[in-house]
Image: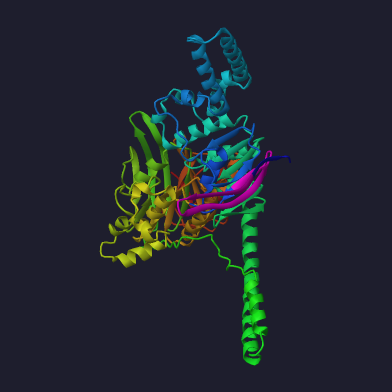
Amino acid sequence: MPLLISVNSISKSYGPQTVLSDISFIIDEGQKVGLIGQNGTGKTTLLNIIYGIEKADNGEITGLKDKTLGYMTQLSPLEDSKTLIEAISKPTGKLGSLAKKIAFLENRLENPGTISTEQLEEISKEYANSLEEFASSGGYGQPTRAEAVLEDLKFTKRHFHTKVGDLSGGEKTKARLASILLEAKGADLLLLDEPTNHLDIETTEWLEDYLANYPGAVLIVSHDRYMMDKIITKSVEIENTRSNIYSGNYSDYLEKKSFDLEKNLKTYAKQQKEILRQKEMIEWMHSVYSFSSLHKTQQKKLDRMDKMDRPTDHSRKLALEFGTAEKSGKDTVDALDVKKSYGKASIIGKCDFRIEKGERIGLIGPNGSGKTTLIRMIMGELEPTTGTIKVSKGTKIGYYAQEQDGLVRGNTVIQEIRKHKKDAGEEWVRKYLGKFFFRGEDVFKKVFTLSGGERARLSIAKLLMSDHNMLILDEPTNYLDLYAKASVEKALMDYEGTVMIITHDRALLDSVAENIFDLRDGALTTFSGNYSAYRKKAGKAKLSTGGDLYEVTKKFTEWTSGKKHQKGDRIRIPEGEKERFIWAIENKCLKKK
């Protein structure tokens, strides 16, 4: 493929702190490249330099002349006072520059002042050319294209005239995404910084397909492992301020990175063995041939050797372990005929479900479908409009809030921990916070100055300070880098308690969730299996959200899954799942309610 841009020896420092050193790589036309590294390694800084928001201290980027770039930052703002369609339709990028130029020229023509006839003709000509370029670039079709993109992202006509400030967090993210996709229509290179944060799974998968088929080049920073596996064909890793290049998708990167680390460790060990051998030989020469300069010659050879630094695995992992409290009852949560409405608006229709001790539930559904409402009812913060939700005696719920609203903005990191461990000395607290990468002066940072990843790590640190036998986690991996996500995933897989997790992280759902609860259009669908199994079945046929409610009259074991059902249990069986229970129904182990 023809070369699009070349990044050559880019370096950037902020005062004494070097962020980037000698960063070099190329992007071909239409190529999809992943920018990989821990939080704080300078990925966003590099994107800003490529886009022109920041300047590099050294190095250059060639090939950008006459190229169109689109950029979705983590903080791409839209005007809260404008309606959604107004905010999205506003020309940006090349169209935005042309619109500003046209407005400036119009003002000159309307107020000519002392402009000469010759100058006026030149301005008129430039104005006409700008109008023609604006039209040929699709400027006048912007509102129509904006509506099409918004509909693709599942916005309704009702949303079009809603003020941006009145949208939910997830809707604002989708609106920002719509804005950048409009700008990206003609972009040669699209820069994306965490585009899936706060997106629901459906929108994430839509974006994934869009980017996979996007004709231009893409440079993306994302902690979505499935997306990175599907779309990228090259990885640029930033480690120790320098760049490493790997071909293939994210899984290929992990495999090659692991291979390189193992290979380099062996090379390092071999060199250390040779250094030791030469040192011993120099000492022997010096003792035996003290009158000779042989040992000095050999020492000079050793000094000139190009010595390796010990290879380090920089994929740092959080030291996580979710401890468990005393055992809860067998049926941790039991919900029967539950409905929730606000006035005339029904949020959750009639649903029944049971969460058993040790079960791991993945709760999914579009943004705004009522997932947070459901977990607030389970925790007793909201009452159902009708029906009951019973939490068994002895159940101790630990809750991780997506917005980390349990943190006090004015507190320091160390104060947040001491709130929950008042008798702990500073040494213990510092050691504990070190497990979550808060070290040195970091412990005195105010909460409001922390990055999203730092707030997430602090919230997890607080959650782990208490013993729970049920965890309800609302987007626990948002803002975490790929290495920290892997740590959360492993800790949840090792956890012996009950888990309900709301997440758009499909890799986390596949690893942790044994059962899926899908809440959409007011109805709750339950499925036995992980997310990929659910998607596979849902792709073949739409799963029923209804089904009949049965009571277990004689204990039995499902032959397909080995799951045991006790007398008195209630099971709602969707039509598509009934085949699994035919034997139990025919043998009167199940009675329809």
In this rendering, the count of numbered labels is 0
Using the rendered view, name the quadrant where residue 2 is placed: top right
Q: Give whichever of 64, 450 is nearer the camera.
A: 64
Helix, strand or loop: magenta stretch: strand
**Image-quadrant location for residue 26:** top right
Residue lying at 65% horizontally and 59% vertically, measured from the top left: 256
Q: Position of residue 458 (x, y in %)?
A: 38, 54
Residue 540 at least partly seen: no
**How far from the left and from the top, in percent, is residue 94?**
57, 27
Query: Residue lying furthest top in this view?
Result: 117
Q: Nearer the viewer, residue 226 or 283?
A: 283
Q: Taking 45 as reference, is 299 above or below it? A: below
Q: Is residue 430 left or right of residue 524?
A: left
Left or right side of 322 for 559: right
Q: Is residue 240 visible?
A: yes
| Start-end of magenta stretch | 7-34
Measuring from the top left, give residue 514's x and y in whole percent: 51, 53
Residue 17 rendering spot, x and y as whole percentages: 47, 54
* 38 inside magenta stretch: no
Q: Residue at x 33, y 51 (%)?
A: 446
Residue 385 position (above or below residue 433): above
- In this picture, residue 541 sits left or right of residue 453: right
Tell me the residue at 50%/48% (across/down): 516
- In terms of depth relative to the viewer, which is nearer, 333 or 123? 123
- Residue reaching furthest to the left: 423
Q: Nearer the viewer, residue 69 or 303?
A: 303
Quadrant in which the C terminus is drawn: top left
- The residue at the far right in this view is 1
